[in-house]
Amino acid sequence: MLGLNNKKDFTLLLVVAALTLLAPFVLNPFPSDSAMAQFNAGYPDLMQRFVIFGIFAVGFNILFGLTGYLSFGHAAFLGVGSYASVWMFKLLSYNIVPAILLAVVMASIFALLIGYVSLRRSGIYFSILTLAFAQMSFALAYSVLSNPKFNLTNGETGLQVYANDPQVFHRAGLPDVPHLFGLSMRSTYTMDVGAWSFSFNVGYYISAIVLLLVFYLAIRIFRSPFGMMLRAIKSNQTRMSYTGLNPRPYTLAAFVISGAYAGLAGGLMAAMDPLAGAERMQWTASGEVVLMTILGGTGTLIGPILGAGFIKYFENIFSKINDTVLHQWFAFMPDGMEDFMVFVIKPFVGKGWNLTLGIMFMLVVIFLPGGLVEGGQRLGKWIKNRGKSKDSPAKTEPAE
Amino acid sequence: MDAILLQILNGLDKGSAYALIALGLTLIFGTLGVVNFAHGALFMLGAFCAVTLSKLLQLSFVTIDATKKDFLGNPLKVETPYVEAWFGPEIGASIIDWAVPLSILLAIPVMIAVGLIMERGLIKHFYKREHADQILVTFGLAIVLQEVIKYYFGANPIQTPPPDALTGVANLGAWFGFDLPYPIWRIVYFSFAALVIFGVFAFLQFTTFGMVVRAGMADRETVGLLGINIDRRFTIMFAIAAAVAGLAGVMYAPINPPNYHMGMDFLVLSFVVVVVGGMGSLPGAVAAGFLLGILESFASTTWATTTIPGINQIIIYVVAIIVLLTRPRGLMGRKGVMED
């Protein structure tokens, strides 16, 4: 169906579709006035971040997961996408279609240029080259490109739309926020069912549909002969060149595709909130997408989306936990015990979320190189095999 | 002439920091074959050794001096640092004043311990894994270290002044008949860095231990077959590399008030330095460190920034890109190291 020969892939697409389209329900399992409401994630802003970073990570995975080239500069493309779309808002109108198109095009051009140079080297050199390019873009966007004569990025303040911008296609009837032919990205329909309240946001649904489209595209890439070529690059580049194939065009194509994904994510980010800042290009942002992909599962289809959702969800939840909340949780314990528990847990929550993230990331890299997906598979296997006899024949590994 | 000299001098202090960090990175890479993304965090830990010691020395107890009044009319509370009470006010005050240089004594054992724990506890298990995995796990470790520091010391930079005797400006040009004012501490930093660098090279060149390590860098397997426990020596080299980064950090604290993310800022640049110098080449790393530091300082002159705006921000990256594309092995890279 839909050109997906593998039944599993189709199921996967359906699962992702169901999850994203029903997200307002899925992420809001607790009544809004209960104590558990702080674990709800079904509000528009956070849901938008889930899918946008999902797109970013899916794109990154096409490069890293398939070819094994670890880019530490992908945030540059995200930033370029954001800047491009805010410029379209400034010049044309708040309609998101031209903005996102330009974001993708600009990011692809950037990726083509940077990729052409960086891909001459591989391994750690490639990582450092991409890192250098991204840091360079960040430094330029932050300082030079915001001088009064030629203000392309608006420096520290960030690029935003001002009242005196041309906006040639802006008409009186159209909303003053990003919109899709008049449909404002911010309009939200809230449905109250008993104690629950679910919000359906236009921006979220547009991003979700985009995510489904690009996820479908990613599946097709993974299963195509082109995808096989990329895997060949990862497993043994030398062998591939000996068979008479030049790996570089394939890697470059993968790099540009993943750059375009990043640009798309950047464009969507700007569409949700018409603001673009240089810090989106900083290497910590590039590191974040690496974390998402690894945490979810490199080289798997669903992994990056899971990783993005996981990190963004826990970032949001953990950051909200403060002393008061902790004391509430451990209120049932004797006083000294309670204080001790709060003392132990405090460094890991609230502002300390990054510490938890770092530890989690290290644990995943050390013990679970396949990420959450591998964890799930192992768990599934363990449950399946639990009932069976222990002396099952050892699995034989195919020879390399 | 003196303008050029001044720019060269200006580049030396940053260049020294780059050179020291890059030296450690190269040592680790050359011996263990591990790409250590947490090396910047070690630099930061060193700087926080200085912060910790100066805070510890300033720990004080409060006595109430009834003879004097403060501006509210209450008896004056006098804070006396314990050090001053123990050693007498004059020696105590000078100990506090010299906190940063004294931190070297604290930083060496601390950083060696950190290095040993890190190598035995984590890096050891990553010898055989891909470089990407090594980068990722040390990147995670760097995040953890920097968040721990942030938790205990806060996110703001902490002022750590140098000793009074070494603050201020010396006129270096006076001997040669022209005007060349230059901060004394930066001269100290450069001399210290030069000393450490010479120390490391001498250690590798003139001791039996160093000879074995160099042999191990050239051919680990053969050295192992000769019955030498090369792993243990490499572990010690890792600890030394950590100590070098830590020392670079300690002495850098007065130049740039330490904050928790300073390591990351330096790490990115130091990697660029290592790549420019040539992966696996110790002299290359040092030379490239100073070279890029000086280049950066030349690029920050008004003349350069008006000719090409923003050149000071990107010069290092531009140089790195050019070097990587034209001389893939770096300036002094050895054959066969990290070639794929």
Image (cartoon, helix red, strand yellow):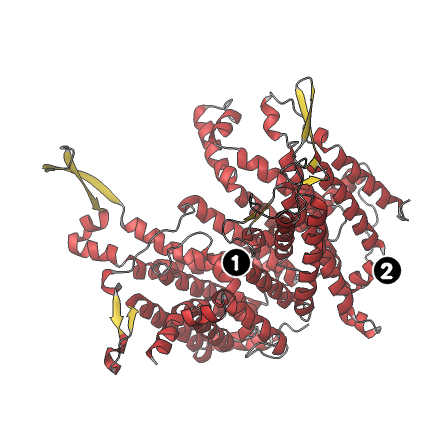
Counting from the top left corner in percent of width and height, residue B134 is at: 61, 59
Residue B261 visible from this viewpoint: yes
Which amino acid type is shown beneath numbered disc 2?
Answer: Pro
Element type where label 2 sits in the image? helix
Counting from the top left corner in percent of width and height, residue A299 is at: 74, 53
Location of mark 1 (residue): B38
* As drawn, A305 above or below B162: above
Circles 2 and 1, Cβ within 8 Å, touching? The answer is no
Counting from the top left corner in percent of width and height, residue B298 is at: 43, 73
Q: Chain of mark 1?
A: B
Residue extending farthest to the left is: B67
**Mark in the foreground, 2 or 1:** 2
> Which of the 4 image quadrants contains residue B192?
bottom left
* As drawn, B23 above or below B259: below
Q: Chain of mark 2?
A: A
In the displayed structure image, the side of residue A18 where residue B47 appears, left or right:
left
Counting from the top left corner in percent of width and height, residue A110 is at: 66, 61
Q: Which mark is residue A9?
A: none
In the displayed structure image, the side of residue B165 where residue B310 appears, left or right:
right
Q: Quadrant of the N terminus of chain A?
A: top right
Location of mark 2 (residue): A225
Residue at horizontal 41 percent and vertical 45 percent from the top: B154
Q: Nearer the viewer, residue A220 or A371?
A: A220
Q: Is the residue marked by circle 1 packed among few (<14), some (14-19), or many (20+) residues within 10 Å?
A: many
